[in-house]
Amino acid sequence: MTGGKWFLLFGVWLLYGSFGLIMTSLAPMASLIIDDLSMSHGAMGLAMGAWQAVYILAAVPAGMLLDRLEPRLALAIGGTLIGLSAAARIFAVDSTGLVLAVMLFGLGGPIISAGAPKVVVSAFEGQDRGLAMGIYMTGPAIGGVISLTATHAVLLPMFDQSWRAVMGLWTGVTFAAVLIWLVLTTLVGTSKPQKPTGTQPSQLRVISELIRKPTIMIVLLMSIFVFMFNHGLNNWLPALLQSHGLSPVNAGYWAAFPTVIGIIGSLIIPRLATPERRFNILIALSVVALLASLLLRFSEPSSFVTGLLLQGIARSSLMTVLILSLVELPEIGERYAGVASGMFFSAAEVGGVLGPLTLGLLYSPSAGFATGLWLISGIASLMVAGAILLQRRVRGTHAEP
């Protein structure tokens, strides 16, 4: 599979790109949907976040499914569920219908999130494995950028301001990605799930045993912190920049800057995170996240621009390097990569919900986001401590006779 593995990676990238496309598709059309469905802004907020609650519950079962089925079929199921979520939104007639349609995304999303690293672990080794992870991680970022930039600039004028038509286009793109994935995996093939060599423990027993491992618990806790950092800042960054005096237009441009830096970083940093220096890179990225959270407190251009640059570097690779650290732990490996990835994303999405929620609750008209940024700095400090502790634990384990 020397050459074919890159075709597999392309297929994974398309599926993950569709993930990002559909995940962000409501945001640029929110006002149109609110008017069309006679929704309140609160109901729209509920619809936007409905998938995350389902995702948290579905992530571990999705990982278990991935360890039972071959990746070809599992990821096709995940992509199909995402496509069906987009299609169901087209036919929503009220807020309840839209919420239910978005919830369907929460069933398919974790299959893609957990399945992508499993495919990469089985097909790539060494530096290529880190590079492959960095490449597929650009998928949701690029999908999100396309959705956010093309909707108003190109698609809504083209489709006579019909949000349903735009959603129909994204539905077609997602199902096309599933079809391409099936064609590529038919031509190249994917690894089969490992056959048990004896009495096979139940998946629930596997989860119970894994969660008792100190190294795995550290990674799961760090995943919560990483998602609180990423999702908290990502969701509130335009408003944060406006609180520094930027216009809404300029705030939007500068808020996209870390995304661009993140895409570049995703192609460079994970490839460098080979086993011998992975934890040093994880510590360095956590320190970079801490510095970013401190610099974003200041309104001077030199401070917040540097903060945005550092945020882009941190967000580009923190999750990638952390997942890589998890699936290459001796107690995980390829055999349990699916269920471990499911556990990772189930825990991480708790942070994905808490980050934006907490920063919103801590905002005040007088102090702005100052209190929330102190919280983010505290979280980044815990990430640094967790990375150092994880390094010591793993090296201590390897040092044992």
Image (cartoon, rainbow, N blue to C red):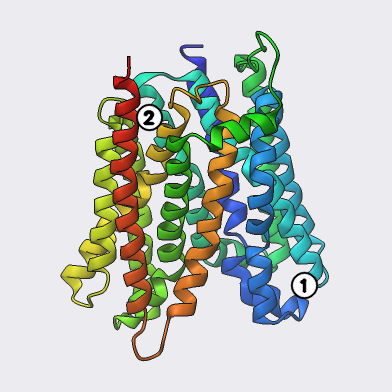
Residue pictured at 27% horizontal, 69% vertical:
296
Amino acid carrying mark 1 in the image:
Ser
Q: Where is residue 40 drawn, in percent x and y?
A: 70, 82
Closer to the camera, 277 or 37? Answer: 277
Rendering quarter of residue 276: top left
Q: Where is residue 165 drawn, in percent x and y?
A: 71, 60
65 is higher (above) or lower (below) than 86:
above
Res. 130 mark: 2
- The reply, left or right, for residue 33 in relation to residue 255 is right
Residue at the limit of the structure toward the left, as seen here? 302
Q: Where is residue 60 drawn, in percent x and y?
A: 65, 40
108 is higher (above) or lower (below) than 251:
above
Q: Where is residue 345 drawn, in percent x and y?
A: 55, 45
Closer to the camera, 25 or 77? Answer: 77
331 is higher (above) or lower (below) than 270:
above
Q: CA distance from mark 2 to mark 1?
A: 42 Å
- The reply, left or right, for residue 9 in relation to residue 250 is right
Q: Which residue is mark 1?
A: 95
Residue pictured at 16% horizontal, 69% vertical:
302
- The reply, left or right, for residue 36 in relation to residue 41 is right
Residue at the limit of the structure toward the front, as seen here? 401
- Residue 287 showing in the rendered view: yes
Residue pictured at 73% horizontal, 44% vertical:
81
Residue pictured at 56% horizontal, 63% vertical:
151
Rendering quarter of residue 336: top right
Where's the C terminus, which quadrant?
Answer: top left
Label 1 secondary element: helix
Res. 332 mark: none
Amino acid carrying mark 2 in the image:
Gly
**What crowding class fits label 1: few (fewer than 14 Cα within 10 Å), some (14-19), or many (20 or more)?**
some
